[in-house]
Image (tube, rainbow, N blue to C red):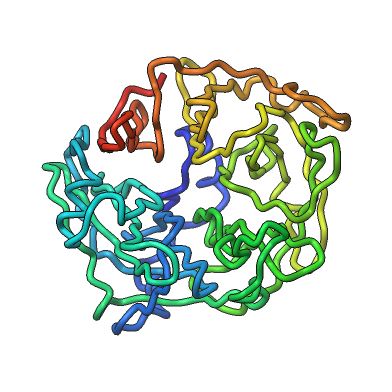
């Protein structure tokens, strides 16, 4: 089995890979059928084995598995496109202020970058998937006749549901996803009492359960919360036990043992850091360097944070109101405006970075 698109460091990938035996491409694509992939939106992305791209469709409350056919090993050591948002907009026949690049991932086989894009805004927006190869060429991944499989979420928020501020809850049905050990792990909201939900969906897709309701103590708010969704997460082993490290808005970092994520149950996470309020975490990766594993997290207003995992097992949970506490971090001063982040290889990451004018560049950087 290939742990291709999980946002993990080398050590974590190796640890997870020891848990499972190899499977054939025929198995991974056994439930796929050719035809139109009827995405209503395209949000979080993750690669699985054999070039399979998983796409979160919050508007349609579904996960799509798409056969990209992109399985040839790539030789590129970097990716670089200046002004990529303007180039994508021109390609789609619109202006840069009328597109949103929702997510970016690297195919670990080919090293090509994939983007999920909304053309337009609000109810009139439609989804587009794009590929960027090592030469910087941008092409559309056609959804008109592609081998794919679809898994519908059974208890997503209703299409017209809103929070107390009038914001759509449906758009948060899927906030992040990753392929791990034959399963697609999905974070987001449900219509259950504990709205914040983590799901473990077997792949190839079969029956989908209601997921696990999750609760955390949010130190900055000084209270327990069950309705705030995980914004981004990464699988990681802590003392030989598989965990999810999950980040929330404003910005608690929480660990969940994977073994606790049982369908139909409720679980309390352990808040191991409060990283500052008025901030939204965007992406996380874990990587190894110099014998130590590090978390790298980009944020909406607090830059890019780097945290060592060396002492992560010693933090037993924040349980009182606090502004900033727990796992220490350093801010990478030279990385500003990072909107998207994914691991490119063992030594570098791909980032989508925005300057003060709003122009975005896709490029690779050395892991700090």
Residue 222 placement: quadrant: top right
Q: Residue at x 55, y 55 (%)?
A: 175
Q: Residue at x 40, y 50 (%)?
A: 103
> Which quadrant, please, contains the C terminus?
top left
* In-front residue for pair 186/336: 336
- Give percent across and percent down for residue 258: 69, 50
In the picture, measured across the screen, residue 80 lies left or right of residue 58, that is: left
> Which quadrant, please, contains the N terminus?
bottom left
Vertical comparison of 20 with 315: above or below: below
Residue 241 placement: quadrant: top right
Vertical comparison of 267 with 318: above or below: below
- Give percent across and percent down for residue 57: 47, 68
In the picture, measured across the screen, residue 293 lies left or right of residue 98, that is: right
Q: Residue at x 80, y 48 (%)?
A: 225
Residue 336 makes an appearance in the image = yes
- Give percent across and percent down for residue 286: 51, 33
* Residue sticking out furthest to the right: 320
Vertical comparison of 205 with 322: above or below: below
* In-front residue for pair 42/289: 42
Q: How many marks?
A: 0
Vertical comparison of 77 with 64: above or below: above
* In-front residue for pair 87/345: 87
Residue 14 makes an appearance in the image = no
Q: Residue at x 58, y 58 (%)?
A: 185
Residue 183 placement: quadrant: bottom right
- Give percent across and percent down for residue 340: 40, 40
């Amino acid at each position: 089995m290939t742990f291709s698109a999980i946002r993990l460091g080398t050590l974590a990938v190796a640890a997870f890979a020891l848990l499972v035996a190899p499977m054939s491409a025929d198995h991974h694509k056994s439930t796929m059928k050719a035809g139109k992939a009827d995405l209503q939106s395209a949000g979080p992305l993750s690669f699985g084995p054999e070039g399979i791209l998983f796409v979160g469709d919050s508007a349609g409350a579904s996960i799509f598995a798409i056969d990209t056919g992109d399985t040839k090993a790539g030789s590129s050591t970097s990716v670089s496109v200046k002004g990529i948002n303007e180039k994508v907009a021109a390609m789609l026949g619109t202006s840069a202020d009328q597109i949103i690049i929702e997510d970016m991932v690297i195919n670990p086989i080919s090293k090509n970058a994939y983007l999920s894009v909304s053309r337009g805004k609000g109810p009139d927006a439609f989804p587009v998937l794009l590929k960027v190869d090592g030469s910087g060429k941008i092409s559309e991944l056609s959804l008109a006749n592609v081998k794919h499989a679809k898994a519908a979420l059974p208890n997503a928020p209703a299409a017209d549901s809103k929070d107390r501020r009038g914001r759509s809850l449906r758009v948060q049905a899927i906030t992040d996803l990753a392929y791990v050990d034959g399963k697609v792990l999905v974070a987001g909201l449900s219509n259950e009492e504990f709205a914040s939900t983590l799901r473990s969906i077997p792949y190839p897709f079969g029956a989908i359960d209601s997921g696990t309701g999750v609760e955390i103590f949010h130190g900055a708010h000084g209270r327990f919360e069950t309705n705030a969704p995980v914004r981004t997460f990464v699988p990681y082993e802590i003392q030989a036990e598989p965990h999810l490290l999950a980040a929330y808005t404003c910005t608690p970092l929480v660990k969940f043992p994977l073994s606790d994520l049982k369908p139909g149950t409720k679980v309390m996470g352990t808040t191991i850091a409060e990283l500052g309020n008025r901030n939204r975490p965007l992406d996380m990766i874990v990587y190894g360097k110099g014998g130590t594993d590090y978390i790298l997290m980009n944020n909406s207003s607090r830059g890019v944070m780097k945290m060592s995992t060396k002492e992560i097992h010693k933090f037993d949970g924040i349980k009182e109101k606090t502004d900033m506490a727990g796992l220490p971090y350093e801010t990478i001063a030279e990385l500003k405006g990072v909107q998207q982040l994914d691991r490119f290889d063992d030594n570098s990451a791909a980032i989508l970075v925005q300057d003060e004018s709003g122009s975005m560049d896709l490029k690779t950087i050395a892991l700090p």
